[in-house]
Image (cartoon, grey):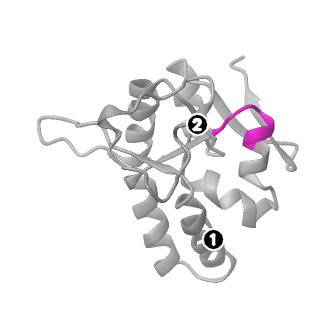
Amino acid sequence: MSALSKTESDDFSSSAVVYDSASDILIDTNGFMIPVQFGIDIFSELKRLGFTGFLTIQAVVSELQKLSQTVSGSDRIAARVALRLSQQCRLLDAPEPGNGVRMYADDIIIESALQHSVSVLTNDAGLRQKLMKRGIQVVSMRQMKRLGIINQK
């Protein structure tokens, strides 16, 4: 079991935690929605790719909470399942933007991935491009049936 695996006795303060860039991955909002939308078990797929530490940020959890209350139909179901899945992840502290500047979830994901040297699971094409431009390893859906590591072209 990874040092970052969630257990009953975990202290969720990330200040003293060192993340493993080879085995830890930060999951974004639409990454959590993949299981319902596409029928892919993200945790099994991530383990198959060699990831053992699953991370997220409060901005993602907040977005899932909002979606689970504001959208309807299959999107609401996906958001509610995603919210439950997010509870299996270690919560990272968000980087401080400074100067009273508000950071958006994508910016927080990028800065968190850089700060902790971890990969990111996202199915968002725009975020995927931003991450790759910053040299961050990205995992995304491949062929609508599995996850794969995306290489920058």
- In the rendered structure, find residue 146 and report the number of the disc placed on it: none
Above or below, 133 relative to 92 = above
Disc 1 and disc 2 in contact, CB within 8 angstroms: no
Does residue 99 appear to the left or right of 140 in the view shown? Answer: left
What SS does tag 2 mark? strand
Residues drawn in magenta: 46-52
How far from the left and from the top, in percent, is residue 80?
A: 58, 74
Res. 141 image quadrant: top right
Above or below, 61 relative to 107 = below
How many residues crowd mark 1 within 10 Å: few (<14), some (14–19), many (20+)? some
Kindly give the residue lying farthest to the front in the view shown: 9
- Please state which amino acid type lies under the numbered disc 2: Ile
- Determine the CA span between mark 1 and mark 2: 19 Å
Identify the residue at image location x=54%, y=20%. Answer: 133
How far from the left and from the top, in percent, is residue 77?
A: 65, 77
How far from the left and from the top, in percent, is residue 44?
A: 78, 48
The N terminus: image quadrant: top right
- In the rendered structure, find residue 81 and report the number of the disc placed on it: 1
Identify the residue at image location x=49%, y=65%. Answer: 64
The C terminus: image quadrant: top right
Above or below, 27 relative to 86 = above
Q: Earlier in the sequence, mark 1 or mark 2?
A: 2
Residue under pointer 2:
25
Identify the residue at image location x=74%, y=67%. Answer: 36
- Please state which amino acid type lies under the numbered disc 1: Val
Magenta-span inclusion, residue 85? no
Res. 114 image quadrant: top left
How far from the left and from the top, in percent, is residue 67?
A: 50, 71
What SS does tag 1 mark? helix
Magenta-span inclusion, residue 51? yes
Does residue 141 appear to the left or right of 56 in the view shown? Answer: right
